Image (cartoon, rainbow, N blue to C red):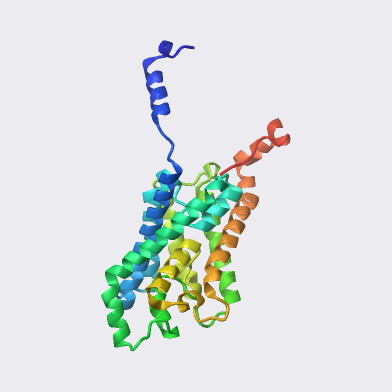
Amino acid sequence: MLLHTLPQKTKMRFYMAISMKQPTLGGQCLAEFLGTALMIFFGTGCVAALKVAGASFGLWEICIIWGLAVSMGIYLSAGVSGAHLNPAVSIALSLFAGFEKKKLPFYISAQIAGAFCGAGLVYLLYVSLFFDFEHAHNMVRGSVESLELASVFSTYPNPAISVGQAFLVEVVITAVLMGVIMALGDDSNGLPRGAMAPLLVGLLVAVIGASMGPLTGFAMNPARDFGPKLMTFLAGWDEIAFTGGRDIPYFLVPIFAPILGACLGAAGYRGLIARHLPSAIEAEKTPEAIRGKAQTSV
């Protein structure tokens, strides 16, 4: 059928559809950078206010602010990049939800850079208060004692737990996070999406932080931890920023544990929940599914 024979409304929809451009990879990376930077700016900013500015935040208040920071980062970037804001999420989505693997290096680089810049901006705004705190407490930057301030920007484990225990904690809590993210992103699951989804993810982050944060600082995100650690290293904390005063360099834990946890969470959701949803069960009954042509996707 020729285009000019179509009804006017149909032609308008056609023109609008072809005029809508898909985001470029550069635009997606910029969105990941800005979303991650915003998340880290608000999250580490509240911890800086607590540590060096005398703010009276409790654990729950800090966790709520971190959760809202995650939500704001998602709102900012979701329409362009999908708002991963987390290398572990990007990797898990590439394995279990069809995210293009060729984009991974670019997304991950943008996320780490965003986290670095978000933390760096907080440090720039609070820098005089950091110096005053160090002077008042006779604290030498780069010493084990200075981890108290380095922890404003990145995570370190509770002194009472081992590196192995910290690794397990990060695997478990990231698996929980990723499983719920998969559930919220699944069209077949019947859960509220759109404007509600970022708030629900933020609330989950807050609940995880309140329950498990005292153990490891609830990193759950390699970029959220490594970017700020790199910033503190360059700001004078030196190698203690990466080792955390442990024999095994602690920075490895918030990199690899969240990746493993996110993959386990995504696999668990696909295997334990998604396959039992009504749409998935119905699809299995079709000849296409029997021949292996139909797949449940998130």
- Residue 11, picture quadrant: top left
Q: How many marks can you see?
A: 0
Measuring 33% from the left and 89% from the top, which residue is drawn there? 138
**x and y, in percent, of residue 241 in the image:** 45, 75
Measuring 48% from the left and 52% from the top, which residue is drawn there? 107
Residue 286 in sight in this render: no
**x and y, in percent, of residue 203 in the image:** 42, 59
- Residue 294, picture quadrant: top right
Q: For this view, does 157 lie left or right of residue 134?
A: right
Q: Nearer the viewer, residue 34 or 173?
A: 34
Q: Nearer the viewer, residue 224 or 131?
A: 131
**x and y, in percent, of residue 208 in the image:** 48, 65
Q: For this view, does 40 lie left or right of residue 106?
A: left
**x and y, in percent, of residue 47 in the image:** 35, 71
Looking at the picture, does residue 295 appear above or below residue 267? above
Looking at the picture, does residue 232 appear above or below residue 264? below
Q: Residue furthest right?
A: 291
- Residue 49, picture quadrant: bottom left
Residue 47 in sight in this render: yes
Q: Quadrant of the C terminus?
A: top right
Looking at the picture, does residue 56 appear above or below residue 63? below
Measuring 36% from the left and 58% from the top, which residue is drawn there? 38
Q: Nearer the viewer, residue 276 or 220?
A: 220
